[in-house]
Image: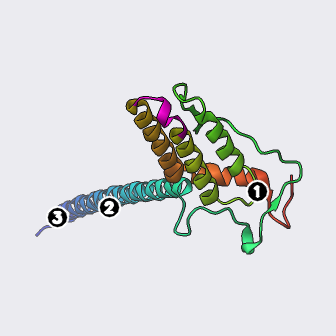
């Protein structure tokens, strides 16, 4: 082998090494890029999974706000302290409805009285939800019993169905309105009364 051919081989070898090195770098870069894409996809999937889990957890929290938790629906202060009545609070009512919706009770306008009493009960410090809901049910049933002998069976049945539906609504979805009303009507000792 001559000196010229040895130099040529070295040049070819160097070129071959550069090409191989470039291929290795490209493969490593592609591998890194592929790994990066796979990691990003995993992170995205984890992020999406976390979002789904957080959404489900939030939905359950919202459901439990409205229906109550394992202990039912109570308004409590931290540390088990008994809530105290706000001295300047005046219980109020918004009629038959909640969540910004107003029920149409024009066919049985006396039902509005039961709704008002129910709202005032929720909005009176330390009255239990159970007590208020039981009084509401009794008020509605008394109205229907009171009209029974003066109206047709269809109207009486409509009154009973309306009463049952309204009572079921308070039982199923009344926890948040109850707790919100108690929070307005009461304060926790050691916290601001305002």
Q: Residues within 10 Å of mark 1 (few under 14, many from 20)?
A: many
Q: Residue 53, image x and y in percent?
A: 43, 59
Looking at the rendered image, the disc whose residue lies closer to the viewer, 1 or 3, is 1
Looking at the rendered image, the disc whose residue lies closer to the viewer, 1 or 2, is 1
Q: At numbered mark 1, what does the secondary structure look like: helix, strand or loop?
A: loop
Q: Residues within 10 Å of mark 3 (few under 14, many from 20)?
A: few
Q: Residue 3, image x and y in percent?
A: 18, 66
Q: Pointer 1 and pointer 3: residues touching (CB < 8 Å)?
A: no
- Rounded to the nearest angstrom, the CA distance separating label 1 from label 2 is 60 Å
Looking at the rendered image, the disc whose residue lies closer to the viewer, 2 or 3, is 2
Q: Pointer 2 and pointer 3: residues touching (CB < 8 Å)?
A: no
Residue at the disc numbered 3: 9
Residue at the disc numbered 2: 35
Q: At numbered mark 3, what does the secondary structure look like: helix, strand or loop?
A: helix
- Rounded to the nearest angstrom, the CA distance separating label 2 from label 3 is 37 Å
Which of these two is toward me, 34 or 114?
114
**Of the residues under marks 1 and 3, which one precedes in the sequence?**
3
Which of these two is toward me, 10 or 95?
95
| Residue 166 versus residue 172 in the image, above or below | above
Q: Is residue 126 left or right of residue 101?
A: right
Q: Is residue 192 left or right of residue 153?
A: right
On the image, which quarter does residue 40 sit in?
Answer: bottom left
| Residue 66 versus residue 117 in the image, above or below | below
Q: Residue at x 62, y 34 (%)?
A: 112
Say which mark, if any, is on residue 125.
1
């Amino acid at each position: 082998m001559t000196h010229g051919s040895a130099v040529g081989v070295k040049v070819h070898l160097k070129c071959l090494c550069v090409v191989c090195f470039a291929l290795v770098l490209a493969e490593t870069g592609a591998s890194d890029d592929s790994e990066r894409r796979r990691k990003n996809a995993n992170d995205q999937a984890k992020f999406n999974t976390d979002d789904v889990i957080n959404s489900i957890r939030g939905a359950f929290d919202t459901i439990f706000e409205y229906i109550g938790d394992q202990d039912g629906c109570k308004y409590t202060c931290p540390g088990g302290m008994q809530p105290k009545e706000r001295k300047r609070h005046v219980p109020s009512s918004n009629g038959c409805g909640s969540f910004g919706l107003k029920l149409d009770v024009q066919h049985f306008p006396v039902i509005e009285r039961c709704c008002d009493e129910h709202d005032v009960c929720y909005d009176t410090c330390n009255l239990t939800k159970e007590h208020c809901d039981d009084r509401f049910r009794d008020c509605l049933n008394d109205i229907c019993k009171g009209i029974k002998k003066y109206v047709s069976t269809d109207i009486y049945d409509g009154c009973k169905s309306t009463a049952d539906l309204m009572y079921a609504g308070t039982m199923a979805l009344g926890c948040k309105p109850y707790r919100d009303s108690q929070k307005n009507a009461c304060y926790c000792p050691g916290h601001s009364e305002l």
